[in-house]
């Protein structure tokens, strides 16, 4: 068991519906604490294991920067640089972590938006005397997109593209940090070996995975894996399927065999190909975007002109207008 003054922080990364709740729940049933966790619902009956404060904190900052949870833009992370370096934002996170660590020395933080604030958490962690460990959940993009489309009614093309972009970004950001990539299917099929991989990062699990019976045995239900691998139910172009498969296979090699220079090279190639695809997509719709932007500008100008006209005072009648009115009155009486 961890001593009372030994702080541990595990951050679970991955898009929604990729098994992050199952991993966070496994840790929560192994001695870790989720501060003010969001309760489960019909889309996730066993619970989300997401701290409400962290979710609201990340959502507010993303909205301010105009970045989506599964943003498809490979350069979107740059829009958050000013936010993550803001002393007030860092102090807000530091104060919250200090308060939570004072009551619970081992915290697990899971939120699909968290990867966008990797630099922020990494910068604040030393100030609260903790070294974050990262668990990245890996699930095929077709499964994730099918699940998100069914439960959240989201469009599939940006869903797959967002999965590719965020998955590649998660790997790149955490490269060199204490981390482990875990396949969702492996976790639900036999959770103990995957929990032991997390423990090998220096994470204290209590009860340990070799304990029998264990609370996690009752928590993980393989039957909750409703979506199966494959593109049959996902209507996206073939070139996007190919790119998604390439990213999934390369990341799976890290999950199965660990880090290697060959995988790093392949991931760099996939990132380059995705950036080219994104740039070509923007060029393809450039004319329509320009027309929409110009139409919006004209509409805004008309609205501003109308509002300005409404604010103008009515001019006082001139002397000539008074004379015309007087003549008209006299002619009327005559």
Image (cartoon, rainbow, N blue to C red):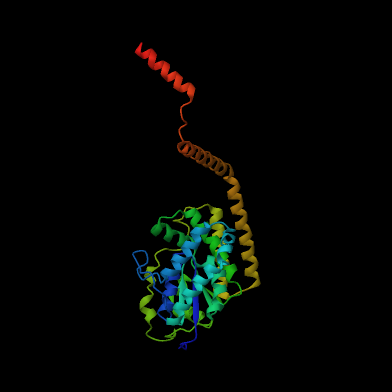
Residue 91: x and y in percent read 52, 72
| Viewer-proximal residue among 300 and 163 | 300
| Viewer-proximal residue among 165 and 309 | 309
Residue 28: x and y in percent read 41, 78
Kindly identify the residue that appears in the image at 54 percent across and 63 percent down: 166
Residue 179: x and y in percent read 55, 75
**Side (left or right) of 304 relative to 39:** right
Question: With respect to residue 174, does 333 lie above or below?
Answer: above
Residue 277: x and y in percent read 60, 53
Kindly identify the residue that appears in the image at 56 percent across and 54 percent down: 239
| Viewer-proximal residue among 164 and 325 | 325
Query: Number of numbered discs present?
Result: 0
**Residue reaching furthest to the top:** 334
Question: With respect to residue 70, does 9 lie above or below?
Answer: below
Kindly identify the residue that appears in the image at 50 percent across and 62 percent down: 61
Q: In the rendered view of the protein, which quadrant contains the C terminus?
A: top left
Q: Quadrant of residue 248?
A: bottom right
> Is residue 8 visible in this depiction of the protein?
yes
**Side (left or right) of 213 relative to 193:** left
Question: With respect to residue 273, does 14 lie above or below?
Answer: below
Q: In the rendered view of the protein, which quadrant contains the N terminus?
A: bottom left
Question: With respect to residue 208, does 92 lie above or below?
Answer: above
> Is residue 182 visible in this depiction of the protein?
no
């Amino acid at each position: 068991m961890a001593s009372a003054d030994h702080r541990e922080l595990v951050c679970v990364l991955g898009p929604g519906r990729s098994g992050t709740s199952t991993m966070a729940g496994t840790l929560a049933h192994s001695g870790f604490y989720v501060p003010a966790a969001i309760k489960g619902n019909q889309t996730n009956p066993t619970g989300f294991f997401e701290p409400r404060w962290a979710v609201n904190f990340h959502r507010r900052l993303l909205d301010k920067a105009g970045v989506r949870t599964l943003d498809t833009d490979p350069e979107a992370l740059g829009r958050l640089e000013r936010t993550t370096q803001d002393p007030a934002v860092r102090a807000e996170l530091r104060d919250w972590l200090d308060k939570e660590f004072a009551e619970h020395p081992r915290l697990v933080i899971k939120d699909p938006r968290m990867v966008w604030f990797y630099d922020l958490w990494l910068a604040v962690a030393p100030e609260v005397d903790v070294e974050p460990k990262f668990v990245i959940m890996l699930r095929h993009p077709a499964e994730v997109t099918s699940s998100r489309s069914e439960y959240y009614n989201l469009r599939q093309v940006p869903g797959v593209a967002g999965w590719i972009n965020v998955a590649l970004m998660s790997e790149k950001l955490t490269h060199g940090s204490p981390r482990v990539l875990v396949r969702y299917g492996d976790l639900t099929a036999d959770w103990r070996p995957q929990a032991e991989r997390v423990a090998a990062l220096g994470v204290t699990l209590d009860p340990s995975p070799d304990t029998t019976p264990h609370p996690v045995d009752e928590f993980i239900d393989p039957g909750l894996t409703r979506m199966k691998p494959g593109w049959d139910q996902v209507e996206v172009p073939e070139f996007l399927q190919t790119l998604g498969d390439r990213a999934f296979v390369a990341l799976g090699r890290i999950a199965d065999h660990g880090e290697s220079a060959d995988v790093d090279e392949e991931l760099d190639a996939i990132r380059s190909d995705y950036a080219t695809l994104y740039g070509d997509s923007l060029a393809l719709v450039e004319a329509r975007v320009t027309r929409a932007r110009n139409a919006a500008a004209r509409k805004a100008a008309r609205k501003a002109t109308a509002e300005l006209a409404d604010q103008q005072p009515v001019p006082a009648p001139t002397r000539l207008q008074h004379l015309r009115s007087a003549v008209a009155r006299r002619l009327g009486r005559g």
